[in-house]
Each structure stands twice: as C-alpha cells, then as structure tokens.
Amino acid sequence: MELSHILEISKCKFNPKTTNEIKKCIELEHISQETGKLLGYTNSNEQQSIKNVFKKDQVLFGKLRPYLKKYWKADFEGVCSTEIWVLNGKSVTNDYLFQFIQTNKFNQIANVSSGSKMPRADWKYMAEIPFDVPPLKEQQKIAQILTTWDEAISKQEALIAEKEQLKKGLMQKLLSGEVRFAGFDGEWEEVRLGDFLTERNIKAPKSREYPLMAFVAEKGVAHKGERYNREFLVNDSDNKKYKQTEYGDFIYSSNNLETGSIGLNLYGSASISPVYSIFQIQEPHNYQFMGSFLVSKRLLHKMIRYRQGVIYGQWKIHESDFLKIKEKIPSPVEQQKIAQVLTTADKEIELLKKELEVLKEQKRGLMQRLLTGEVRVKV
C-alpha cells in the first residue's frame, strides 16, 4: 500500500507567543543521528517560532537533511521544530512505525528531497511510494523483537559509558599519585618536560604514498588522515614543511592550545601539519604512561605563564618554553605498572564496543529480513 495509507503527518501547531503554557521543546540538535535517542530539550517559552505538537508514543522524524537519520519515539508530550515531522501510524502501530522509518527503503525515498542547500524530505513524492505491510499481530511481534535488540544495544552503551567513567576516575587517581600500587611509596621526582621529551623536527618525505595524519583533539589521539596521495604534500606549493611523526610521539598544536589539540600518536609513521610540535618520549620512560599523563594534565595551567600573544583569538607556546615546564613523575617501573592497568581498561572497553557493533549489525540484519517480509514471524 502507498505510504500515505501507512502513516500520517500530524498538523497540530503550538504558538509560544500566544500562550503562557510551557512545554518541553525538541529541536533537531536534540535528536541523535541514527540512534533513536534524545540528547536533551529546551523549553517552549524560550522560542519565538511556531512549533509542531507531539504526544507520547508518536514518532518524530527530522525532515530537514533527512540523510542525518534523526528519529525518536516520544516518551513524553511536548512540541518540536517544524523541521521535524510528527508521525502517526494509520495501518501500522507506532511501535512498528518507529522501526519502519529506520529501513533503507524509507530513508532512500526520504532523501529524494527538495532544495539543494537545505534539503527537505518531499512528502508529496513519498506519499505515493508503495510498501508491503504485515497484518497487525505480525507488526506487534516484529516490533517486539526489534525493541528487544534496541534494549540490548542501550544496555551495552550504558555499560560502555560506565566503564569509560570508571577509567576516567582511575586515571585521575593513578596519574596524580593519589592512589599507589603496593611496593611503590617513594616521592615522585620533579623533572622538566625536557628531561624526557626530545623535539622531533624532521621534514616529512614528499611522497604521494606517505600518509597524512589528522588529529582527534577531544580524544587525545592522532590518527591517519582520510586521503592519501595529496598533491600539495608533494608539490609543497604553499611552502609548508610537513613534519614526520612516529608511533608513540607526543604532539600538540602550539596555535590551538585552548581547544585541546594535544595528544599521542597511536597510528604510526606519517606526515603532519607544521602547526604541530612533535616530541619523542625518551626511554626508559613509558610512552603509554607519559601520553596519558601529559594529556590528562592538559598542562594548560602551567603553559599560561609562557604563552606568547594571541593569534586569531588563540595563544601559543614555543617548544623551548614548553620543555621548561616542571612535573612530578613516578619511576619508569611504576609508569609501566600504571600503563598496564590503563591498557587493560582500554582493552575491556574496546571489546565492549566490538560487542556493541555486533548487536547493531544483528539488528540491521533483522530489520532487513522482518520489515521487508523476507522472513515472516509466527503469531
């Protein structure tokens, strides 16, 4: 049957200018991409524009830039942006509808959109597209099965978040010396960063095959760039001297300190923009410990005394001044012990993330089979 017979778009509106009633208000930024989760909300009295009204159990779908796949099944009533469709099932239940709008076919037709700069799903086009829909009891059974997978995915995500929070607390205690392992009770030695960091200032080879490194500031980890064979690295048309970095190097951007561009190269040999300062961690110090130690400290409170001017609203610190900063660090043996504990925690989190991806892939497979009629369920 055609989509217009499967679902309908609610037209109920709310004008915050004509009422004192305050409702929870959902904007597009409050809906997570491809997860069906709500990230937050604002209040209607903070808005000036007309809103759509939604009720509990109705399904919200972002019609603006539909390729972002923003959807949510309401667990409270409120209002939302007019860039969000409020959907009701006509020949399907809303539980089934929530799963239905996640299918490849629905998203494909939603992305046949109008507008180029601000593409929006075109209901006039979508309304006439036919879909196969199972009987009511089968819909309920399918929704129940897929909801079970959603719940398992949510539990796994919550477990990962809990483990990451525990690791964060563990890092704060271990990297500050607040908690010590048995057999380690001496005072940490105060040293200059230059005592265990050596600047690596080697020009990267001009090779089309040499990878360019990007940087993930918020995670404190550098990683491979998206593309190889970048001609500007070979031609050097802008006279930039890209630097070479190796696995385990400590890196920071001297022109971008306040946004947190500081971390450890856990990718390997690569070239990186000259805006970054690169330091090799000297043996016998443990690079895993030192990377975590330096990133967690952020060093900003000590860097401020050495900062030089402001460039486009950002301040910088010269490499020589950076190496003068003093920190208290444990012995190499204690460093290794701390690194082992944190690495074990990282491996546990990584395993949980892999299990999460398996659950998501299983659900995608089930959706493809159950929502297309490829596999029928007994009711």
Image (cartoon, helix red, strand yellow):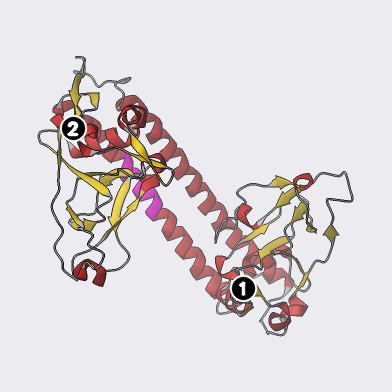
User: In terms of secondary structure, what is the magenta stretch mainly?
Assistant: helix
Query: Which of label 2 and label 1 is nearer to you?
Result: 1
What's the magenta region?
Answer: 345-354
Is 56 or 19 nearer to us in this picture?
Answer: 19
| Residue 285 located left or right of residue 17 | left
* Residue 292: percent from left, percent from top: 28, 36
What's the residue type where badge 1 is placed?
Answer: Pro
Q: Which residue is mark 1?
A: 119
Q: Nearer the viewer, residue 13 or 323?
A: 323
Query: From the viewer's perspective, is residue 29 above or below residue 198?
Result: below
- Residue 212 position within the rendered picture, expressed as x and y whole percent measured from the top left: 25, 61
Q: Secondary structure at mark 1?
A: loop
Near-viewer residue (245 or 258): 258
Quadrant of the rendered image containing residue 97 = bottom right
Judge from the rendering whether residue 203 lies leftward or rightward of residue 103; answer left or right.
left
Q: Residue furthest top?
A: 186
